[in-house]
Image (spheres, grey):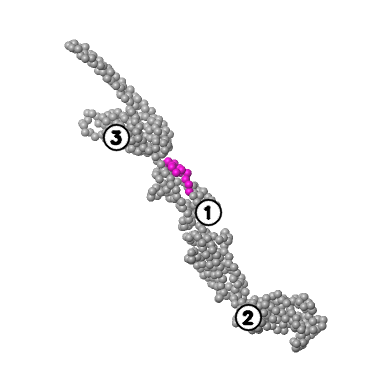
Amino acid sequence: MRWTSVIVVVLFLLSLLPLASAEFGTLSTNTSIILVRGDYSSGTLVLTNNAGVSYSVVSFQRYWVESENGSTVGGFNFTMFPTVFSHWSSGSSNTVSYNLSCSPNVPPGNYTLHLRFIATTSTTGQVLILNAIVPIKVLSSPLKFLRAQTYVPGRGEYSYVFVGEKLIVYSHILNIGHKTVKVRASVKLLHSGIPYYTKENTAMIPPGDTLIKFAVPIGINYPTGSYLLVYTLSYGNQSYIFKKEFTVLTGVKLISVSIQSERVLLGSPDEAYLTILSERNVTVELLTEVFKGKEKVASEHKEVQLSPGTEVMGIQLPTNVSGNITASFKLFIGTRLVSSKSLSYSVLSPPGITALKKRVLNDTVVFRVVVSNSWSETQGVLSYRIESGGKVLYQDSLLRVLPHGNITFTFSFKIPTGQNVSYVFTLKALGHSSSVKGVLYIPSPSTPTKTTTTTTTSLQSNTSSSSTTSASSGGSGALWVGVGIAVIIAVIVVVWYYYNNLSSRKRRRKRPKRRSPLGRFKRPKPPKFHERNSLPKKK
């Protein structure tokens, strides 16, 4: 209590001394004060005694604020604690707590806070006036907008973004004041000057650090190309604008399509190969459509999970319809078509019997079998079977060369009249078979003339694979042997009857020699088979 009373008395006496009898000194500080007009700032100041002497007592006397031009400015209120310091040695520092408030009428700018202290030296008791200078910066706004940042969720900060993704833009706002203020924030996404996305928000910013964030969706149907992101913050007359360009991509592309075989036989397997480049993890839909002309032959939807890289996919193509076929492949992300390609291939029918023409001459029928081969030249087995009354009249299997295009095979048979004769012709080639069959009826000579010959013909095609087996022709050979024996017996009977009749007659006159009937007999010719590329011309 005694020393405290002494210090108070000394400080009182020092304050009464005239300034003219004192010398001046300084206290240094490295602290500056920033505050918002109409608000206050509080903190600590570190004051350092850089003079070469020690002070026994130092007392805070008063303060004032000057502008940049040196004139005194009002509107400030400053307090500090403590205000009295004892035994302040040279080179040492003391820390004080302060509170500086500013009137709303103070213009923003740079100011200087002057602090005056009265001190006595420890050795001589000399009285000194010490000044400390503290820089002040007065702000019109309590907010500090920090730099905005962008990123794509799951991928990080990129200069491009894929359709269907989101683009995040965010920034921090520092409120150095002591009041909550209202900030308007907005974001726009422009493409060729046209806004594709716009959003505005009002945010309440309390003292301290506040995060403002927008999630900008990139629509599935947004056009690809360059976009401009504009992010704006505003408070009173203060604003912050952030702009950044982005490229919008689909991230998926169908690079090429190829096919296993451009010419394939009907019913044979064929496959298309699709090469897809993906820059992202995404699920796409693959639509495959197959057309013959304008008619849709097949359609298939398939979901495909893609990852970054190149992927080759195999797609089975339909070959159940012959002709020129076009296959279209389309990649979708959601409802958006991102890439498409197409290819063409030909489905060829196997060699087959396309027509059967008949011509009847008395008891002989000529069959013309038309075979069509849209494939390259190959071999096939052409077989026939002709029956009547449950007996096989003719039967055989022939190995034939089938060139590309149409070819006609001609068969000639003698058949019985007055009864139904059934026939069937079958072609087997390239693992496929086709056949034509029917029933033929030729009236007998005793039947009145003008009787119409009735025939029934049907075409059948079987595309299932089968092995080629040559059928025997025993029925046809046996028939010809029987016909030959009957002819020989008839000739012998005629010769015997002739000579027997000649010997019974009287020889009235010489008759000219006649050749034996055996010399005029000609054995029946076997059936002939003619191969022609077209039907014979009518005479």
Magenta stretch, residue numbers: 257-270
Disc assigned to residue 102? 2
Q: Secondary structure at mark 2?
A: strand
Residue 12 versus residue 160 in the image, above or below: below
Q: Is residue 288 left or right of residue 408?
A: right
Q: Front-most of 139 and 441?
A: 139
* Label 1 secondary element: strand
Residue indicated by mark 3: 537
Q: Is residue 108 covered in magenta? A: no
Q: Earlier in the sequence, mark 1 or mark 2?
A: 2
Q: Amino acid at mark 3?
A: Lys
Where is residue 357 shown, x and y percent of the image? 31, 35
Can the viewer see residue 87 in this picture? Answer: no
* Distance from Cα at disc 1 to Cα at disc 2: 61 Å
Give the Cα separation between the discs numbered 3 and 2: 121 Å
In front of the other: 302 or 165: 165
Q: Which residue is mark 1?
A: 278
The disc, 3 or 2, on the residue closer to the chain's N-terminal end is 2
- Mark 3 falls on what kind of element? loop
Rendered location of residue 128, percent (x, y) = 76, 83
Q: Earlier in the sequence, mark 1 or mark 3?
A: 1
| Residue at the image position 51 percent from the left and 70 percent from the top | 200
- The image quarter containing residue 51 is bottom right
Which x, y percent locates residue 11?
76, 85
Q: Residues within 10 Å of mark 3 (few under 14, many from 20)?
A: few
Say above or below: 331 vs 528.
below
Placement of the N terminus among the 4 image quadrants: bottom right
